[in-house]
Image (cartoon, rainbow, N blue to C red):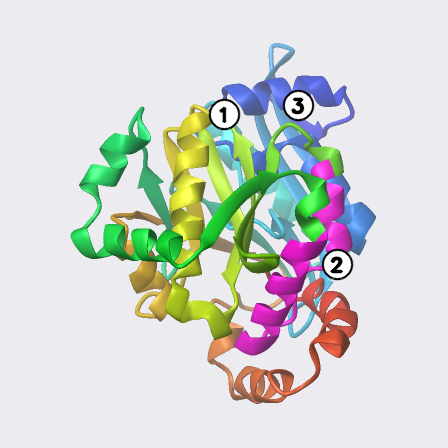
Amino acid sequence: MRTGIFTGLRDEWDAYVREHPQATFAHQYEWLQMVHRVYGGRPYYLAAWENGRLVGVLPLMLRRLIGAGRVLTSIPFSDEGGVCASSGEAEQALVSLAGQLARELGAEHVELRQMQPLHLPDLACDKSRAILRMPLPAESEHLWQSLSVNMRKKVRRARRDGLTCQVGDAGFLRAFYGVYAQNMRDLGSPMHSLRFFEDLFEAFPEAAVAVHVKRGDQVAGAAVAIQFRDVLTVLCAHSLRALQKLFPNNLLYWKIFELAIERGCSLADFGRSPRGTGIYEFKKHWGMEECQLYRYILPVRGRPHLTDMRDSLAHRAFAFVWRRIPVGLAKTLGPPIFSRLPI
């Protein structure tokens, strides 16, 4: 078996990714290229070959992160990533190569975000995170009937109070970003740049989609999602807090389910949420299933850090201040900070 930096055609890389059962949208060659264009960072594509045939891939990006220094991550700005390999041997070879590359680059550690456990029991693993996914039937009516009476009531209430849904493309992004940025500011968190979403639609024009929930001309809620094979992954879904009594989030989620079914998906992936939080419970009330994430840290210099920075006093102090700055200022200052967070 041979491993090294992949220098072949991106079509060869993507063909392997499309066929691998554990691959995600972010394993596609273009994802790291898009992140590089928007935020910088250096992409590295590691691969394993056997008898001239591709048998494993590991996309990585070198980033300088706040509080962590230089880190090789698979995959930034995605809950899921890590190694895709056809055998345990290829998997171990790619992890070993990632450690070697990290040492050459002077990185502190390698972070691998896996949906399945690696065959490396000695590697430090954080299991505190999970994503929530909704299994989808072939018809939306079947899903509707499976929802709780209370959930259906709230969706009907949103419609009765005049909320409507629209599905669109990149033309929806500016209105989406207004809701997204305000909500992120209110949560005390920096946010992606508008350019990130614009580049997403340019890089994946057939896969990316936006959804609006409107009250008249006002956008009350909005989401951006991307499809890979039969999974629609929701990257962001937000609604205005001032209109929560109209249940825009309920209508937004239901429209996403309908859209995913229309596009032939069997799963809607709503990403990770901290256990015990309001958004986690909201997702669970829809009937979503929890899927364990395995966050592996391969230390290169010093001991691995598995703690969540959101638990720190510094992060709580930052969030307290951030909630009080104007949204316009948050849009300016937020993306440069966001790009250096371990996300």
Select label 3 or label 1 by which is in front: 1
Please name the amino acid that badge 1 sits on.
Answer: Arg
Residues in magenta, as a range: 174-201
Q: Which of the labelled discs sits on residue 106, or is there none?
A: 2
| Badge 1 density bin: few <14, some 14–19, many ≥20, Cα 10 Å | some
Q: Which of the labelled discs sits on residue 13, or is there none?
A: 3
Q: Distance between the residues labelled 2 and 3?
A: 27 Å
The answer to which quarter of the image holds residue 174 is bottom right
Residue lying at 73% horizontally and 23% vertically, measured from the top left: 10
Q: Quadrant of the C terminus?
A: bottom right
Q: Describe the element under mark 3 as helix, strand or loop.
A: helix
Q: Are marks 2 and 3 in contact (CB under 8 Å)?
A: no
Residue situated furthest top in the rendering: 51
Q: How far apart are marks 1 and 2 (CA)?
A: 36 Å
The answer to which quarter of the image holds residue 130 is bottom left
Visible residue check, residue 254: yes
Please name the amino acid that badge 2 sits on.
Answer: Gly
Mark 3 and mark 1 lie on one chain; the one further toward the N terminus is 3
| Badge 3 density bin: few <14, some 14–19, many ≥20, Cα 10 Å | many
Q: Taken as a whole, is the magenta stretch helix, strand or loop?
A: helix
Q: Which of the labelled discs sits on residue 229, or is there none?
A: 1
Q: Describe the element under mark 2 as helix, strand or loop.
A: loop
Residue lying at 71% horizontally and 41% vertically, measured from the top left: 170
Q: In this view, does 117 lie above or below 237?
A: above
Q: Distance between the residues labelled 3 and 1?
A: 16 Å
Q: Is residue 190 above or below residue 324?
A: above
Residue 138: image location, x then y, percent: 31, 24
Q: In this view, does 261 lie to the left or right of 194?
A: left
Select label 2 or label 3 by which is in front: 3
